Image (cartoon, coloured by chain):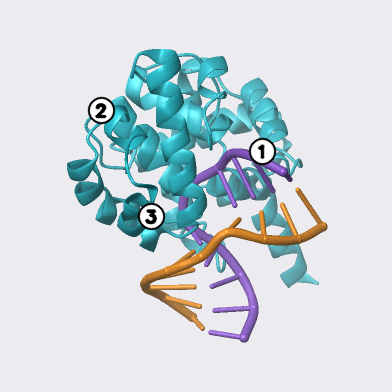
Chain colours: A cyan, B orange, C purple
DNA sequence: ATCCCGAGGG
DNA sequence: CCCTCTGGAT
């Protein structure tokens, strides 16, 4: 029924409901500084935030800033982050990113998308998280595995490429709400619309969801 | 398209 | 066993 309204209006209704459902939604990663958020976000690739938060206290205690990561024994970083997976790539990226931050940015995390994208292991997803939560700059829509899955199921995009999904979402949502959309939809992805077996009966967005409507039509046949 | 990678759930 | 978790580089 409500699927007949425009996609843009549907996106706004989805956003409104999500904000009511998760009024306190924030970045779930633990950090104290922009650099720590950058490192935590690199670590969060294909890994739950909860698991990242289990390794970062010891990691940030041992390596509190970009300078210490830059001159670290990489093996020591690998051991401290091992349980987050992809530990060799992540350790290499964290160290190379920190070396560049020290050499090119005076040891401070840069505050523009263009500069962030020059860092090892940083693409738009990580850059959007850092810009929004460390600096309050809403540059784009964070598209992670949850945003990708839910945006597809809800019918807000048919694209699979994260950059193209972001372009579609940017057209559908008011700019100040871009990060609120990402954060709240991630909460919803974890709680209700999970990858394996989405709980459509408990979902407040079912009346706005093309995936749910398609499932209903299958049952009727 | 494929690789990197461990931990937890079903 | 298989799939998934706030991806990115080759």
Q: In this view, does A159 lie above or below A172?
A: below
**Chain bearing mark 1:** A
How far apart, in angstroms, are the residues tagged by discs 1 and 3? 28 Å
Q: Is mark 1 on a helix, strand or loop?
A: helix
Q: Nearer the viewer, mark 1 or mark 3?
A: 3
Furthest toward the left, the residue is A61
Q: Nearer the viewer, mark 3 or mark 2?
A: 3
Name the residue tied to disc 3: A78
How far apart, in angstroms, are the residues tagged by discs 1 and 2? 27 Å
| Horizontal relation, residue A105 to residue A148: left or right | left
How far apart, in angstroms, are the residues tagged by discs 3 and 2? 21 Å
Residue A17 visible in the shown view? no
Q: Name the image quarter holding residue A8.
A: top right
Name the residue tied to disc 1: A162
Whichever of callouts 1 and 3 sits on the residue coming sooner in the sequence is 3
Q: Is mark 2 on a helix, strand or loop?
A: loop
Q: What element carries label 3?
A: helix
**Chain bearing mark 2:** A
Q: Where is residue A67 in the image (x, y as percent from the top left)?
A: 30, 28
**Chain bearing mark 3:** A
Considering the image in quadrants, where does the C terminus of chain A appear?
Answer: bottom right
What residue appears at the point 63 percent right and 29 percent down from the top-left corner?
A: A169
Name the residue tied to disc 2: A33
Of A115 and B10, nearer the camera is A115
Whichever of callouts 3 and 2 sits on the residue coming sooner in the sequence is 2
Of C1 and A7, nearer the camera is C1
Q: Name the image quarter holding residue A166.
A: top right
């Amino acid at each position: 029924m409500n699927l007949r309204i425009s996609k843009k209006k549907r996106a706004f209704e989805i956003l409104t409901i999500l904000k009511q459902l998760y009024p306190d939604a924030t970045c779930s990663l633990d950090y104290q500084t922009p650099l720590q958020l950058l490192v935590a976000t690199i670590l969060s690739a294909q890994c739950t935030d909860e698991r990242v938060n289990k390794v970062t206290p010891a990691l940030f205690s041992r390596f509190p800033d970009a300078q210490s990561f830059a001159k670290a024994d990489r093996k020591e970083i690998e051991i401290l982050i091992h349980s987050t997976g992809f530990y060799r790539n992540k350790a290499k990226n964290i160290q190379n990113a920190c070396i560049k931050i020290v050499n090119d940015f005076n040891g401070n995390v840069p505050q523009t998308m263009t500069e962030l994208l020059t860092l090892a292991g940083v693409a738009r997803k990580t850059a959007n998280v850092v810009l929004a939560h460390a600096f309050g700059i809403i540059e784009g829509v964070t598209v992670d595995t949850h945003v990708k899955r839910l945006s597809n199921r809800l019918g807000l995009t048919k694209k699979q490429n994260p950059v193209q999904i972001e372009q579609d979402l940017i057209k559908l949502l008011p700019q100040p709400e871009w990060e609120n959309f990402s954060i709240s939809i991630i909460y919803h992805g974890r709680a209700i619309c999970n990858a394996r077996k989405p709980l459509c009966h408990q979902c407040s967005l079912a009346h706005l969801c093309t995936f749910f409507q398609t499932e209903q039509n299958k049952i009727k046949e």
